[in-house]
Image (spheres, coloured by chain):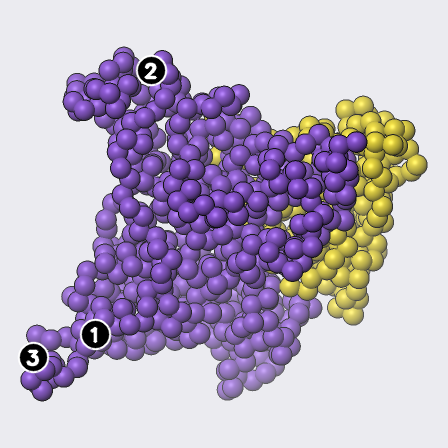
Chain colours: A yellow, B purple
Amino acid sequence: MSISRGSGAGATKTFNFKLVLLGESAVGKSSLVVRFVKDQFDDYRESTIGAAFFTQVVPVDDQTTVKFEIWDTAGQERYKSLAPMYYRNAQCAVVVFDITQEASFEKAKTWVKELQRQADPDIVIALVGNKNDLTSRRAVPAEEAQAYADEAGLLFQETSAKTGANVGDLFKAIAKKMPLDSQKHSQKGGRTSASGASRPSVDLSNGGASNAAGNCAC
Amino acid sequence: MDPLNDAVKELSWTVLERLSRVTRFYRESTAHLLEHPLGRPLVPLLPSALVSHVQVPRGAQEVCDDYESARVYLAKWASSHFARAEAERPGHAQHQATSLGPDGGSPLQASVWQEWLAEQTECGEFEILTSSAAPPLVRSNQPLSAERWVGFFALDTPTTDGTRRSDDTNFRPGQLTVTADEVRRAVFAGGVDPDIRPEVWKFLLGLYPWGSDEAGRYILRTRLTNEYYDIKARWLNRPAEHETAEFKEQCSRIEKDVLRTDRTVSLFAASDSPTPPRAAGDRDGGDSPPATDEDTASSETSGLPGTNANLEIMKDILMSYHYHNRDLGYVQGMSDLLAPIYAVMQDEVETFWCFVAFMDRMEPNFRRDQAGMHKQLQTLCDLTQFMLPRFYQFLVDHDADNMFCAFRWLLIWFKREFAFADILVLWEVLWSDHLTPHFYYFVALAILDQHADVIAENLAAFDEILKYINDLSGTIDLSATLRRAEILYHRFGQQMDFFDRHAQPSCPAEGKEGTGTAPVASNVTALPPSIPATLRALRPVRVPSAARSTLSSVAQTITE
């Protein structure tokens, strides 16, 4: 992916959006983002502990670029209580399941429900069936996932982080779905000063209560 | 045109990308970032002027504005430069360790303690903290040798008059002839020689009581072996058990993580066996009909990459741990704690019990309510405020004082931060409990201290800080970090003592502090802010290792 230098391209507008990756453990969340950001794949990518942060830009058209600030989270149930601090301020979410694991699809549905209940009402959610290179072991029919996505109002894409199939398309589709007219997400001239649309306000208190005023809330 | 700006323009995204590749590549190595063959060609590409500036110049700033993460890489690079400069100046770290020093013109605000001090003294200096001599450092980087280790124990060797010492009825071969504290100190000082590591770890982790002798340990080994296989028998070759949702869930979780744990370490690298179509453990259950549990959870995850004999044993150990501690079960992160122990022990039974002992310490990290992690992050937060007040204020200003950037450090004791070989040394140093059982906080503080200036001057948001901290993985110098941690620990003790003395107005300060060395003392009009309980708890409270352990009833029985 080519990236313009910004300074000469004064006409380009860059929109920043915070994106969170959610889904069952080992469905390929980190692999998906690493494929998207670095175009790499590792069979033995270690589990994510805590969270990881990435950024990547997607050109939408000649004048418009979307920059995703991506929070990649740990998938195991035990760390579920940490997720709200990442999706609370997210404008988009990618909920991933593994097409060879029926249970991971069910898990994805619970994530979607939680997002629709707890996250920003305007959040754009994409449902992603990953590992579609393993079609011989498919356990979730694409039609079923598509029907669910339609019903729940989600974007849907089947991808393979391993082969790279549809990964770029997925993020491009999300970028196009984002509200690109809203001034609050825009930054002219490709500048991405550190203050994005909304900074994550992270705290570890259960239930997502806001930080105690002025002091450490860990 | 400023040559610096020209040079900065060469700092293209490609170069920065390459730097990031180097860091990732470096997981398996301890050497310095830019000393690596992949890193070395980068050096001439980096503007020399940049080398002497932490503050990234305006030209670089423009590049960085385009690519936010470039700032993170630049900051990282600047930091590595400082690390090298520091390494070249022996003893420098001693002075570098930050404390409640003068503000130094920084715009950042001070902590409550520093504010209190500023009220007490016009100059804001804090000489008292450096006036008392710090104890000499224990860290030496000299590993405990096999020879010295053997010398710690009573040996059944012939004495000069030809009799054997075992003729003496009070003589117990293999008993420690020095104190446990002496052994702990030696381990803390430099880790241990790899040859004796399996043996030393069994003592450090409490598998072998310090007071045991060779005969007692022999009995213990037998009992632990039997006990392990009893635990394993609760699930191995039990088709009915394998049908339970609990077993399937555990099996699936364990398999997912073990297959992606430390696969770059040679012991775990091979994929010479396919992922078994049946549940872990059945492969050695020859008398079990193959069809019995074909549809267990592991068959559902057979899309995963290949496995090998060592990984299969690790799966068995983790499944057995679930049956040993069913309240907790397997939680993500545990496979990271297990792999180094297995690599050292390479014995299923011993690895299991050492892992159990380690988990006795680590269990609060993995509890469902995450209370253990909350408490530790709070403690690290308090410690940072107490010891690195300006950096703490920076974190507050950037919504990063939740210390979540250190979550991975604390959860699995820096396992992902250092090369595999370094983790073995770090963990044995931490297990030694020499200065405090909570030395890991000071390791965390040392890493923060090392990078505080670079982070504060280059990074502007929580996400950047988290990325920077995550990306330190594989680049942290263990020896320098441990040295710095020890210095910080002593500083911490001095500061605690200082505030405690001034928290008791009825008890007048010692005479010498009322004179020249302590401008603070004569001006004290108010009590200092109280020190949180989280910090008080970091001071060592000596407990016998047996009291802490829930290891095994068996282990207790042979203690003297």
**Where is B34 relative to B559, above or below?**
above
Same chain under badges 1 and 3? The reply is yes
Question: Is the residue under label 3 in contact with that under label 2 (CB below 8 Å)?
Answer: no
Type of amino acid under label 1: Gly
Looking at the rendered structure, whether the residues under marks 2 and 3 are on a common chain is answered as yes
Q: Can residue A116 be seen in this view?
A: no
Q: Mark 1 points at which residue?
A: B174
Front position in the image: A69 or B227: A69
**Residue A126 spot, x, y in % from top left:** 77, 45
Q: Earlier in the sequence, mark 2 or mark 3?
A: 2
- Quadrant in the picture for the C terminus of chain B: bottom left
Residue B234 appears at what percent x and percent y? 42, 71
Residue at the far right: name it. Answer: A62
What crowding class fits label 3: few (fewer than 14 Cα within 10 Å), some (14-19), or many (20 or more)?
few
Residue B538 visible to the viewer: yes
Q: Is residue B124 above or below residue B187?
A: above
Q: Where is residue B171 in the image (x, y as percent from the top left)?
A: 11, 75
**A74 on left or right of B338:** right
For the N terminus of chain B, the quadrant is: top right
Name the residue rendered at 32%, 40% in the picture.
B490
Find disc 3 in the rendering and name its residue.
Answer: B168
Residue position marked by numbered label 2 in the rendering: B121
Q: Are marks 1 and 3 in contact (CB under 8 Å)?
A: no
- N-terminal label among 1 and 3: 3
